[in-house]
Structure formats: structure tokens, C-alpha cells
Amino acid sequence: MKNLRVTRRGLLGATAAATGIAAFNGPWRFNRVYAASTDKPVKIGITSDASGQYANSGASDRRGMLMAIDEFNAKGGVLGRKIESVHIDTETTPATGSRVAERLISREECGFLIGAVSSGVANAISQVAQKYGTIYLNTNSSSPSESGENCHRVKFVWDGNGTNFAKAAVKNSIDNFGGKWMLLTNDYVWGHTTAAATRKLVDEYGAEIVDEILVPQGTRDFSSALLKIQQAGPGVVSAAVGGDDQKALRQQVADLGMGDKPAWINNQQDWPDVYGLPLDNLFGVFGTTWYYKLDLPGVADFVKRYQAAYPDTSMRVPGNVFYNGYMATRELLRAIERAGTTNNIAVIKALEGHVMPAVERMQHHDAVVDPVTHQVQQTVYLATANRGSEDPDDMFKILTNSSPEVVQDMGAQSACKLESYADTPTLDV
Amino acid sequence: MVQLAPHLFNGLTLGLLFALIALGFTLIVGVMEVLNLAHGSLFALGAYIALTMIDPGWAQNTALGSFWLGLPIAARYAVALAFAPLLVALAGMLLERCLRPTYDKAPLYGLLLTFGAALVIEELIRLGWGTGERHLPVPGAINGAFFFGGLIFSKYKIFAALFSLAAIGAVWFFLERTPYGAIIKAGAHDSEMVRALGYDLARLRMFVFGFGAALAGLAGIVMVPIWGLRPHVGIDVVIPAFLIIVLGGVGSFWGAVVASILVGLAVGVTGAYAPAWSLMSMYLLLIAVVCYRSRGLFGRKSALER
């Protein structure tokens, strides 16, 4: 056997080589630094739908994000760096959402991703984001699973979820319209989880669900479902039908004059889905997180800023989808400023547990980013059609507001298992 | 317990509506052997043009506009139903003009061109009418609901189904009982012979494409009061239309009509017993038929089968 001699030069060389290899392949291989120099812009990837079922809501969501980015840039950006955004259409399709997220992170080198309306798309994006450690804001998808079993350390959910809205509506509806319920459910993740949340509450309050009709996504003719509802004769129909399906459903229910009887609980009503439609199409009660006519400080100014930023938009006033897009982006940028860095773990910590005063969010109660589920716990409003209004934009009549504690989704609290900080790749942009 | 009869009736009306959607598509495929992927966008275009005709909000301050808006909605709706498809026909003719260089090339060229046209038309709709949801008003006489057998049915849906039946009859009469229809069918069967007899084949193709586009536009006007109106509403049309012509047999007029009714019944009845499978049922029907009869229900035998 050859006699090995360890020389000082050899030892130094081996150490240097080992350090070099470890830097790329060692336990730090997830660590990435995109823009080492601080004069480079902070790049945000916008993952909103521009086509498919949620194209219209996606556009509204995007306008909210862009207004927040423009306002920050007008003040000098964030941490003295300009903010840039790149948008790629996620097509209301989970597979496209994954591809878009991969591309925005790997090729466009975006440090943050924002945007979603479809829960399926949001879930797909967040899986990719977690793999890279990229902070992702799910602005507008409201499946309880998003902050429950599909939660992630990098994902923050800004909309109210199906359970929050159901909690605000179910007890009240049982008292007013009786205990015989039917569920009309879109056959995908948001529909199922929202219906499950409603079912749990209906059971809890001692009412009965006589049937659940599952309608596939893409359904344009609801006559079979509406016939079944008539044949069963429930007092209340709780509908978890979204996007274009919901628009077709509303049109057909209004045409049949079934909007008042049975009573309809439409879990959540996104503003872009109903804006400009006849009020007859806006039957039943529904949930929302914000309305442009709330009599609260800052609301009128916010509407003015929207109208100045988007003078040519056919939607003359902002709705809940725009609001969520704006608030999510603004709070992300504020969190970066609070953290004093773009390091993902520091920004995540700056967001977790962060309390947002009611006056800043233009809601009735303070909101908080739940550190356990990463969902924003906020005021939930119940509304109905504003039939007496002369103003065509003033479509909603707000009936009640519920504080975050009352409508909190306890199921998500127990279902959500966030990855540890150590298991989340670190990232600095 | 679900009563079947109302669902069968519902499936039948749904089938007639599917037939209206597929009519223009099957005409263009049958005569020109072009899969017009812009069919859905032409469907949407027809509805948007009708919307502008029925409710031209921008013209209300002009004398003509206020006169027009002073007319009953039934009159404006009837004018839109008659003239909006003609404007869509012009758009279809323009598209056919662009398609001409692809006739002697592989079918893929025509397919890609119509796909591109679909995207362009949809984008033009967004630019012209905005991205939001719109509502096409209909006359009061066909709006609302009626009771039958203790159940509520939509008056408009019955009107749409009857209108579809009339449109099927009119198209059949035109193709089978008029000299123009005979020329079109002859052009589909042996275009060289038609040319040799002195007919202008280019003009014939342009007319057929325009006619198919007008039918797409007409279907759009009739369907959107049920489905709602948005720029991408046409996406919902192309797949059922394509499925129906394959199921019925490519190029077969009655094949398309029968297939539409079968699809409507499948969707309607499945909706009663297993609603989650209602959309899937049409694909299962297609698979079942094509497995046993690859040329569709009424399709001609191919040379390999003879």
C-alpha cells in the first residue's frame, strides 16, 4: 500500500475544493440569491387568470395588485428598490398554474408570487412556491382547504373562506327559512370543501340536508338541478357554485323566478361576477369581505384612487376581488419594509401574526394574519341585492358584519400543518 | 324519488338547443371539410352584435337612438335576430377569404387559421364590449316561467327549443328543396364537376362559410339569455358541436340533429340521477358509439370499409 503523506498545501487545496462543492451541493443547496446588488428591482410574479372561468375576476385581482405596486413605486419602492411585476396567464387551470409558477420563479427570477381566484390553481402554485421557498399570496381563492390541509409555510391566504362565510350565514338562515336544506355544489375542491363546511354547521344546528347536487365545472345548463330542487322542495338551497357556472345558474334561477323561494345562500359573491347584471340575478344572501359603499373612513378615497388609476375600466367601482388583490400586495410590501430585508423567512415572520387595524383595511374589525394557518382572519359581511337603489353601481345591501372571532375556521386550524422554517428553502431576492 | 318525465322533457329541449349550436358547424365541415374552430367566437360575436342592436346605450342621446330605444323590446329583439346573423355572416365570409390559401394544403393549416381567428375575434370582443358579464334582454312574452305538472319551467327555454326546431326545418328545406341547396350539396360531393358546370366554386364556398357563420351567430343570440354573455362564452360551444358531428357522422345533417338530441337526453337524464356525471355522459356516449361504429351514427362508410 502506498504511503500517504498529508502536506499543508494539499490540506488547504482539499479544504478549498470541499468548500466549493459544499456551497453548491451541501445542505445549503436550497439557498438562493437572485439579485445581490440592492439597486436591482424587486420582481413580483403575478399569477392571475386572464382566460378561462375566472378571467374577469383575474383581471380585477391584477388591477388591485398593480395599484398597490404603483403606489409603492411612487413613494420610492420598497427598501429603496423599484418594484417590477411580470404577469403570466394561469388560464384557470391548475396544470398551467404549476407551469407558470415554475417559469416565474426559475426563469423570470421573481422573488414573490401573487394572485389566484381558483382554489385548484392556488394549490398548484403554492406547491411549486413551497419547493423554492418563494412567498406566495393567494389573494382571492376561498376554499377552506387552502388554509387547511393545503396550507404551506410560504403561502398566505387573503380572502375569507367557505367556512367563514357559512358561519356568518347558516344559523341565521335556519332560524328564518327552516331546517330542510339542499346543497348545490361545484364538483371541484372549493365546492367540496365549502359544502363540507356548510354541512358540518347545518348538522351542528340540528337542521337536515336532504340532498346534495354535484354540478361539474363548466355546467351551463342547470335545468336538471333546478328540477331536482323543485321536486325535493327544500326551504334553503346553499350553493357553492363559482365563476361562469354561477353566472349561468343565476341567470336561470332568475328566469324561473326561483330566487325568493327557496331561500338561497350563495356562499360568497365576487363583485366581477355580478357587476352590471340585473338585480334579479342577484338573489338570496351571500358573503363578501368588502363593499365600496361601506360607511367607513378611507373607503371613498380608495374608490377615488381606483377610478383615477383605471378611468377606462368598465367596472366603475372596485369590488372585493380588487380589494383583496390590493390589500395582499400592500401588506406584502409593508412586511418587507418591516423585515428590512427581502429574505423570505424574515418576511414570512413579519407577516405571521401581523395585526392590521380596521381603519387601515377599511373593515369593521381588526384583521390578523393567523400564524397557524396563514389565513387573514377578517370581518365577513352578509349582503343581498339592493333593490331600492337608484345608483346602478350600488348593487349590494349589507345586512350584517361578523367579527373574525365569530366566523373563524377552527377546522383549518387543526388541518393545517405548516412546514417548519428549517424545511423551507431560504431565498433572498 | 325523482320523476323521470320532466327530466326527459328537459333533455329533449336541451338536445334541440345543442342542435342549433351544431348546425353551422356541421354545415361547414360537411360541405367544405374545414373544422371551423372559430365557430364559438362567431357564436359570441352574434350575441354581442344583437346586444348592441337591442340596447345601444351609446346612441340614446341621438334622435335615431331615442327613436330606436322607444320601440318595444320585442321589435328590437326581432330585428336583432334577423340582422345580427347577417353581420356575423360577413365576418365569416372574411374569414373564408383568409382560408382560401389553405384549401390545397394539409387540413392542419385551416385548423390553425380558424383557431387563430377564434382568438382574434374573442380579443376584439373584449376590446369592443369589455370583459365583464353582460345581459341580453329578451321580450317579456318569452321571459319568465310557467307552471306545468306542479313544476316551474322557463318560457324562454321552450321558445329557444321551438326556434331551434324551426331553424333545423328551415336549413333542411334550404338544402333539400331549393336549387341553391342542391348546388351546395353537389359542391360537397364533387366540387370539380360543379366547377365544370359553370358554377363559381369560390363564391359557393364563401356563401357556405357565411351561412354557417350566420347560423353560429343565430345560435349565440338564442343561447346567451340562458348561458349568460361574456367574451369567452364561445369556448363552451366548440367542444359539444365537435362531439355532436363526430357522434352523428361527419357531414350528415340528420346525424347531427339526432346526435344532438341523444346528447341532450344523456345530459338531462344523467343530471337527474348522477348530476356529477352529466357533462361526462356526452363523452361516454361518444365513446360507446364510436367503439361500435367508428363513422358515427349516420356517417358514410369509408373506402376501407366498403
Image (tube, grey):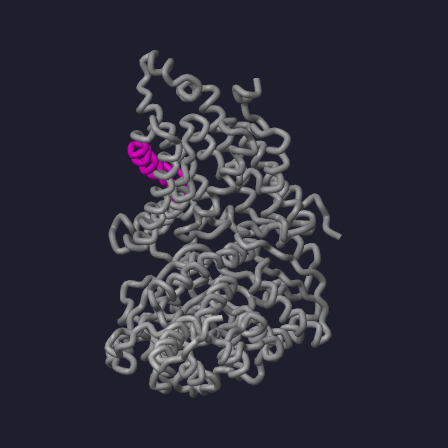
Classify B191 as above or below B85. above
Residue B171 left/right relative to B118: right
Q: What are the residue bounds of the magenta stretch?
A: B76-99
On the image, the x and y values in percent for residue B130 come to: 34, 56
Is residue B90 shown in magenta? yes
On the image, the x and y values in percent for residue B1 come to: 75, 53
On the image, the x and y values in percent for residue B160 come to: 52, 42
Quadrant the C terminus of chain B occupies? top right
Extreme residue in the right direction? B1
Extreme residue in the top direction? B197
What residue is shown at x 29% (from left), y 32% (from top)? B97
State the residue in front, B35 or A415: A415
On the image, the x and y values in percent for residue A380 come to: 51, 78
Classify B61 as above or below A372. above
Classify B82 as above or below B224. above
Of helix, strand and loop, which mostly describes the magenta segment?
Answer: helix
What residue is shown at x 59% (from left), y 65% (from top)? A264
Q: How many marks?
A: 0
State the residue in front, A38 or B214: A38
What residue is shown at x 66% (from left), y 45% (from top)? B269
Residue A148 left/right relative to A288: right
Is residue B83 shown in magenta? yes
Q: In this orientation, does residue A320 appear? A: no
State the residue in front, A357 or A262: A357
Q: In this orientation, does residue B200 appear? A: yes
Residue B47 left/right relative to A151: left
Snapshot quadrant of residue A299: bottom left
